[in-house]
Image (cartoon, rainbow, N blue to C red):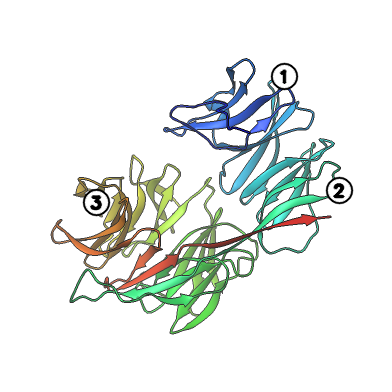
C-alpha cells in the first residue's frame, strides 16, 4: 500500500517505540533540542495530539510498552548510577507507580499476553517482573546481548535478537619528521568481544584496558605482547573510569559507587572507598596531591581527596573530557574552548576554536592534543603549553577508529576500532 504520513513533528525526535492502542491511537515519547521529553498520544481519526506526561514527569524516559488491555503503559528511564527505573502509568487514572530498578542497559520491554508481568531485555539476560515488582531471571544459557525480546500471542514462545559486538584496540606511532603522518595501525588487543578504553601508564610502557570477554567489565594490563587480568569485577559492576598513579604502581578504578585502588604489580586491592554519589567518572590522578580528578553529573569537574574523602567542585558549567598536566593544572573542554585552571586556582581560556566544536582533549608532557568535530575528517590539533598556537598534528577520515589515548611524549596513539556487530533472531520455547 502507499505510504501515508501519520504525523509530522517539527524540531522533535521520537525516541521510543510506537505503541498502538486498539482504537487506532499511537503513544510515543519525543525529545526536543534541549533534551526535554514528553509522552504523547495521537489520534489519527481526530487528528488530535494529547500530552500524557509533561517534561517534569517524562524526564529521561526512553522507551515504553503498552499492556495488551491498553490500560497500563510501562516506562523505562535512563540510568542514574547504572540503575534503570521501570514505572507503570495508568492511562485511565493518570497514576504513576514505581515498579522496579534494573541494573545495566535495558534493550526492550514487552508485556506477557495476560498482562501479568513484563519481559525485559537486560544485557545477556531476560528478566520477568511481576506487578508486585519481583524480578525473576529466565534460565537459559547465553553470553550475548539480548534485545527486543517479545512473547508470541499464546505466551509459549519468546522471539529475541541476540547481538554480538567486537571492539579491538590498535596502536600507532607518529612520524615526528612529518607531523601529519602516522604509521600503520597495529592490532594489539582482539578477543572477539568488547575491548575498550585503553589508557597508557605514565611512562607509556604499558596500558590498561577494559574487556567484556568474560561477560562483565574487567580491567586488564597489556605490556610487551602479554595481557593479564588486573581487576576481576566479581560483583559485575558498571565501570566508571580509571587513572594511573603518577608513579605507575597503582591504578584507581571506579565501579558504580566504589573507588578501588589496585596494586599493578600483584593485582591486590589495597583500598576501596564508597563515594556515595549518584555517579562519578574518573579522569585523572593528581601528581602533587593524594586526590583524583573526576566528573560529576552535569558533567562538572571536581577533585576527590583520597585522604579526607571530600569533593571540591572545580567548574560551574558543563565540562567534558577534563585532564591534568604534570603541574596539576586542570584543562576543561567546554564545547568550543579549553579553560585552564591552575593549581593556584586561577582560571583562564587556554585556547578557543573559531569554527568547530572540541570533541576530546588529551594531555601529554608538552601540550594538549585536541580532537575537533568535523563532518568529513577527524581533525587533530596540538596546542603547546609554552604557546597557545595550534599546529596540525594528524588527520584521518572519520568513521574508522576512535582515538582513545596519547602517550606522555605524544608519539604513541591508542585507538579503538568501530564495533563489528552481528545480530541473529532466535526463539526461546
The answer to whether the residues at label 3 and label 1 have Cβ atoms under 8 Å apart is no
Q: Separation of disc 2 and disc 3 at Cα?
A: 60 Å
Q: Separation of disc 1 and disc 2 at Cα?
A: 32 Å
Q: Is residue 191 left or right of residue 334?
A: right
**Dot 3 or dot 1, earlier in sequence:** 1
Residue 340: assigned label: 3
Q: Which residue is mark 2?
A: 156
Badge count: 3
Q: In the image, is residue 316 above or below residue 163?
A: above
Name the element at disc 2.
Answer: loop
Name the element at disc 1.
Answer: loop
The residue shown at (64%, 27%) is 26
Dot in front, 1 or 2: 2
Q: Is residue 113 left or right of residue 370?
A: right
User: Pointer 2: residues within 10 angstroms few (<14), some, or many (20+)?
Assistant: few
Q: Quadrant of residue 282?
A: bottom left
Dot in front, 2 or 3: 2
Name the element at disc 3.
Answer: strand
Q: Which residue is mark 1?
A: 93
* Residue 45 image point, x, y percent: 64, 17
Dot in front, 3 or 1: 1
Q: Is residue 22 left or right of residue 194?
A: right
The residue shown at (57%, 71%) is 192
Amino acid at each position: 500500500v502507499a505510504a501515508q504520513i501519520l504525523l509530522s513533528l517539527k524540531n522533535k525526535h521520537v525516541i521510543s517505540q510506537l505503541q498502538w492502542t486498539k482504537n487506532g491511537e499511537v503513544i510515543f515519547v519525543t525529545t526536543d533540542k534541549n533534551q526535554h521529553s514528553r509522552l504523547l498520544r495521537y489520534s489519527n481519526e481526530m487528528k488530535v495530539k494529547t500530552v500524557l506526561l509533561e517534561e517534569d514527569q517524562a524526564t529521561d524516559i526512553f522507551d515504553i510498552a503498552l499492556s495488551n488491555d491498553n490500560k497500563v503503559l510501562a516506562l523505562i528511564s535512563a540510568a542514574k548510577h547504572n540503575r534503570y527505573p521501570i514505572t507503570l502509568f495508568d492511562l485511565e487514572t493518570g497514576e504513576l507507580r514505581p515498579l522496579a530498578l534494573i541494573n545495566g542497559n535495558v534493550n526492550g520491554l514487552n508485556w506477557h499476553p495476560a498482562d501479568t508481568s513484563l519481559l525485559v531485555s537486560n544485557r545477556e539476560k531476560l528478566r520477568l517482573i511481576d506487578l508486585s515488582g519481583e524480578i525473576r531471571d529466565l534460565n537459559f544459557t547465553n553470553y550475548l546481548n539480548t534485545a527486543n525480546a517479545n512473547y508470541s500471542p499464546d505466551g509459549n514462545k519468546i522471539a529475541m535478537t541476540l547481538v554480538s559486538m567486537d571492539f579491538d584496540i590498535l596502536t600507532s606511532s607518529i612520524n615526528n619528521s612529518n607531523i601529519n603522518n602516522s604509521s600503520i595501525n597495529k592490532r594489539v588487543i582482539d578477543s572477539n568481544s568488547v575491548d575498550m578504553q585503553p589508557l597508557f601508564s605514565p611512562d607509556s610502557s604499558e596500558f590498561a584496558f577494559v574487556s567484556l570477554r568474560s561477560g562483565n567489565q574487567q580491567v586488564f594490563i597489556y605490556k610487551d605482547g602479554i595481557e593479564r587480568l588486573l581487576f576481576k569485577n566479581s560483583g559485575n559492576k558498571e565501570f566508571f573510569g580509571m587513572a594511573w598513579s603518577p608513579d605507575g604502581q597503582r591504578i584507581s578504578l571506579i565501579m558504580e559507587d566504589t573507588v578501588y585502588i589496585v596494586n599493578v604489580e600483584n593485582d591486590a586491592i589495597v583500598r576501596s572507598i564508597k563515594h556515595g554519589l549518584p555517579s562519578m567518572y574518573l579522569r585523572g590522578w593528581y601528581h602533587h596531591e593524594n586526590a583524583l580528578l573526576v566528573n560529576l553529573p552535569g558533567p562538572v569537574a571536581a577533585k576527590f581527596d583520597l585522604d579526607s574523602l571530600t569533593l571540591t567542585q572545580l567548574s560551574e558549567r558543563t565540562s567534558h573530557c577534563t585532564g591534568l598536566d604534570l603541574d596539576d593544572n586542570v584543562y576543561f573542554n567546554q564545547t568550543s574552548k579549553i579553560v585552564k585552571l591552575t593549581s593556584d586556582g586561577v582560571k583562564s581560556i587556554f585556547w578557543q576554536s573559531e569554527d568547530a566544536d572540541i570533541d576530546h582533549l588529551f594531555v601529554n608532557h608538552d601540550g594538549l592534543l585536541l580532537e575537533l568535530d568535523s563532518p568529513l575528517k577527524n581533525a587533530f590539533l596540538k596546542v603547546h603549553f609554552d604557546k597557545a598556537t595550534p599546529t596540525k598534528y594528524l588527520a584521518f577520515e572519520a568513521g574508522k577508529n576512535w582515538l582513545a589515548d596519547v602517550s606522555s611524549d605524544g608519539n604513541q596513539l591508542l585507538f579503538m576500532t568501530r564495533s563489528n556487530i552481528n545480530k541473529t533472531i532466535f526463539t526461546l520455547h
